């Protein structure tokens, strides 16, 4: 009841602030967030509208990430695009490769008379929505990292320490099982054990500089022996009862952890807000483990989540307002507010320092894990990927991963299939972008 | 009985599709001609009345169809900056993809199963409900009520019943040694989807069969009763042939339902992540077009689907309708 009230009040306030300032330039923001995260977007917009009088921002929810992108594209084709469109990580290549669909965030901000400073952003945030030269195309917005959540009771009962590496996990997992726990579950193998496996282990994901340099002849390196090894281990752990796979659905894998049946769960740094409400036991968090046996492993991961893109074809005055909003959004106070309200990481160093200074992480150490992981030293291959038709490639991965754990295919064969079908899609994408 | 009015008029339904013409006599056609002259003073007026319907059909069916056909020959950047003519390669890519083939196979099996089960169960319930005397309307209302549930809601209910962690059906089955994992095991998910899809469609079939049964004249039933003592045999030889028009109408509707209208159920039950779970061809069109932004490939798939439906409809009317006798 109170939530509905709050929400409608926020919506009303946004609507009113948009209509009351008649002289102001109106800009729109289409996003793909619901629930609490959607409310926070309204609150942020309200704060922006209250902070100045020249611009009035109206946020509109377009459903899920995929729906937001699809409607954004359809709108662009008919010349009805919003000023700002939220696009999720897997859709990054689609929008960034469509040259002329967006105005690079960095250009937008510089043109508006501000000075854009790439170094103000924390390491893991800098490259994913940028071009190969590091220029920001999208403005990182809700950013998350895959981290490991821990059920301390399980480790206490088993009398073992929380593992930092997969080697350590192999050593302690049987004891966790003996203590009556499922040692591990994980919610999104594509993101956590594939894309971020490459970055955490510092291994090349695709040629053409992980796809950043060009779409022509881009091929994925999915039969990499280390990646195959990781999944052979997962399969072996699953057979031995040390890891349990509940399918591709995020929640099906999270639920047993919430119920206290699981010792460690690989989730997202953004899961922490929800987990505080749903977990039946106290929990802590740590970095995503890595293989210490792989040379150069232990580098940072890159951001997941979504970014905001300034759509092209808008008048100068509106672009100025969009730039104003991007500046507002990255200011330390707003970043801190967003970080604390949602659980997504703060994307600028200044915001992180501010939250730290206020003692936020002493009270809630879990909130700091994702940021720290993104701030780990980076490697040549840890900054992410830029691959077209990536949502479909992820679907192929999900299909084959299911088959691995149901015993319908072997790990080697699964990755050969994904690599073949995925590379065919990349070839198709190169044709559409060409 | 309120239901008797909802008896479908197969003649009307079919002639609207342009298939029932031969049954109409010349005399009625002439009469209709005269009627028309009497009713419409201006020759433009009837077209004016037809216009809204035609406009709807044109805007929502023909226009998108033409667009789909044309974009199926192109590879297009989703934002519309560039498109390359690729001839039939979108079609060949789709048809020779092993994933597409397995989805097509599942769609065929799923359609046959859902159609057969929902028709036969609907008929069984209708026959049984037709015989009930005490509390008849309560039974009927209870059976029909399910039809009011929207597809995504029934998908949601199905998802809960078959949930890996808390689903009551899953818990019950585990006592019998069947450890269902909907979302992980292909066949378990297929089973759950079929059950939900059938469950959702039974009431629709039930309503039509029941009204069909109530239109069977009492005199015919009594005559049959004198000739034959076996209720089963009476049903097969007398009642069922009289139900044939209804059954044929429902067959067409149910095939369409299984092919297209189950989308909502499937979308909810795979929880946004099809992975290795079974999906139908329509879901694949959606996934590639709206989530993957592959406009050319998705258009080619929808054209293929259009052809399939076209062939299927012709087949039904050519070969099955011949065996149906109206009146």
Image (cartoon, coloured by chain):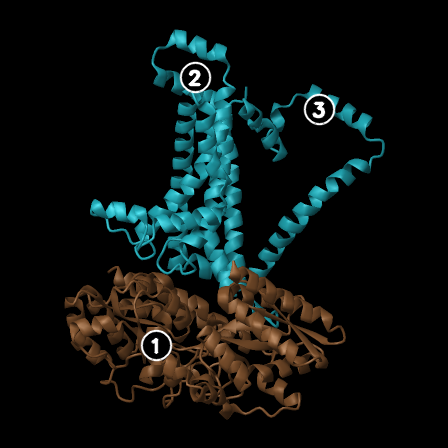
Chain colours: A brown, B cyan
**Compared to A361, does B108 lie above or below?**
above
Residue B157 is left or right of residue A265, and the answer is right
SS of the residue at dot 2?
helix
- Asked if badges 2 and 1 are on one and the same chain, I answer no
> Tag on residue B238?
2
Q: Quadrant of the N terminus of chain B?
A: top right
Disc 1 residue crowd, few under 14, some 14–19, many 20+, Cα 10 Å: many
Q: Residue B31 appears at what percent x and percent y? A: 74, 21
Disc 2 residue crowd, few under 14, some 14–19, many 20+, Cα 10 Å: some
Residue B256 is left or right of residue A366, and the answer is right
Residue A348 is left or right of residue A314, and the answer is left
Residue at 47% across, 27% down:
B209
Label 2 marks which chain's residue?
B
Q: Residue A172 appears at what percent x and percent y? A: 17, 75
SS of the residue at dot 1?
strand
Q: Nearer the viewer, mark 2 or mark 3?
A: 2
> Tag on residue A147?
1
SS of the residue at dot 3?
helix
Quick one: B308 or A392, which is closer to the camera? Answer: A392
Q: Nearer the viewer, mark 2 or mark 1?
A: 1
> Tag on residue B29?
3
- Residue B176 picture quarter: top left
Q: Which residue is outermost to the top?
A: B226
């Amino acid at each position: 009841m109170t939530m509905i009230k709050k929400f409608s009040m926020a919506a009303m306030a946004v609507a009113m602030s948009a209509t009351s300032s008649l002289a102001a330039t109106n800009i729109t923001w289409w996003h793909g967030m619901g629930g609490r995260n959607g409310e926070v977007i309204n609150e942020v917009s309200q704060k922006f509208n209250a902070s100045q009088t020249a611009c009035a921002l109206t946020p509109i929810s377009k459903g899920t990430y995929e729906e937001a992108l699809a409607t954004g594209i359809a709108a662009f084709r008919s010349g009805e695009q919003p000023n700002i469109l939220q696009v999720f990580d897997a859709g990054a290549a689609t929008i960034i490769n469509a040259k002329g669909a967006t105005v690079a965030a960095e250009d937008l901000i510089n043109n508006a008379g501000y000075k854009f400073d790439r170094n103000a952003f924390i390491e893991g945030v800098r490259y994913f929505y940028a071009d190969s030269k590091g220029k920001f195309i999208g403005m990182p917005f809700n950013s998350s990292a895959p981290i490991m959540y821990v059920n301390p009771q399980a480790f206490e009962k088993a009398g073992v320490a929380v593992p930092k590496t997969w080697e350590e996990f192999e050593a302690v997992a049987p004891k966790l099982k003996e203590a009556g726990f499922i040692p591990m579950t994980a919610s999104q193998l594509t993101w956590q054990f594939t894309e971020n496996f490459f970055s955490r282990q510092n291994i090349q994901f695709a040629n053409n500089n992980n796809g950043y340099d060009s779409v022509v002849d881009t091929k994925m390196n999915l039969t990499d022996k280390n990646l195959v090894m990781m999944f052979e281990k997962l399969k072996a752990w699953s057979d031995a009862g040390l890891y349990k796979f509940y399918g591709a659905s995020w929640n099906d894998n999270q639920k047993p952890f919430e119920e206290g049946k699981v010792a460690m769960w690989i989730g997202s740094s953004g899961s922490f807000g929800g987990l505080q409400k749903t977990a039946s036991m106290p929990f802590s968090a740590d970095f995503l483990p890595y293989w210490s046996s792989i040379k150069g492993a232990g580098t940072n991961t890159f951001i997941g989540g979504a970014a905001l893109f300034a759509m092209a074809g808008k008048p100068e005055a509106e672009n100025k307002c969009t730039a104003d909003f991007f500046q507002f959004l990255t200011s330390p106070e707003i970043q801190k507010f967003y970080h604390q309200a949602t659980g997504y990481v703060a994307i600028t160093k200044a915001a992180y320092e501010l939250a730290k200074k206020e003692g936020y992480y002493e009270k809630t150490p879990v909130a700091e894990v994702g940021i720290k992981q993104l701030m780990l030293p980076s490697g040549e291959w840890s900054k992410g990927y830029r691959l077209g038709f990536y949502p479909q490639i992820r679907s192929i991965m999900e299909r084959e991963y299911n088959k691995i754990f149901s015993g319908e295919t072997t790990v080697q064969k699964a990755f050969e299939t994904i690599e073949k079908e995925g590379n065919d899609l990349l070839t198709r994408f190169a044709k559409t972008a060409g | 009985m309120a239901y008797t009015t909802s008896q479908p008029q197969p003649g009307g339904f079919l002639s609207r599709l342009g298939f029932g013409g031969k049954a109409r006599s010349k005399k009625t056609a002439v009469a209709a001609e005269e009627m028309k002259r009497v009713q419409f003073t201006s020759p433009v007026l009837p077209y004016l009345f037809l216009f809204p319907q035609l406009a709807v059909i044109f805007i929502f069916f023909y226009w998108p169809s033409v667009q789909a056909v044309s974009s199926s020959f192109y590879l297009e950047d989703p934002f519309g900056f560039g498109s390359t003519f690729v001839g039939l390669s979108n079609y060949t890519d789709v048809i020779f993809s092993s994933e597409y083939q397995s989805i097509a196979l599942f769609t065929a099996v799923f359609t046959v199963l859902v159609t057969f089960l929902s028709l036969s169960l609907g008929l069984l319930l209708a026959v049984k409900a037709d015989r009930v005397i005490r509390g008849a309307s309560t039974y009927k209302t209870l059976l029909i009520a399910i039809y009011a549930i929207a597809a995504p809601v029934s998908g949601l209910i199905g998802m809960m019943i078959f949930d890996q962690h808390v689903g009551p059906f899953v818990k019950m089955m585990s006592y019998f040694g069947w450890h269902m994992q909907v979302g992980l095991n292909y066949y378990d998910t297929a089973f759950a989807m079929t059950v939900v899809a059938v469950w959702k469609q039974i009431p629709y079939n039930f309503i039509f069969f029941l009204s069909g049964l109530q239109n069977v004249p009492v005199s015919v039933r009594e005559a049959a009763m004198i000739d034959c003592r076996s209720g089963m045999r009476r049903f097969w030889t007398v009642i069922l042939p009289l139900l044939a028009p209804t059954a044929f109408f429902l067959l067409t509707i149910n095939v369409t339902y299984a092919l297209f209208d189950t989308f909502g159920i499937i979308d909810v039950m795979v929880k946004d992540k099809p992975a290795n779970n079974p999906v139908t061809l329509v879901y694949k069109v959606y996934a590639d077009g709206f989530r993957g932004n592959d406009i050319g490939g998705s258009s080619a798939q929808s054209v293929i689907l259009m052809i399939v439906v076209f062939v299927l409809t012709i087949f039904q009317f050519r070969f099955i309708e011949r065996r149906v006798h109206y009146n």
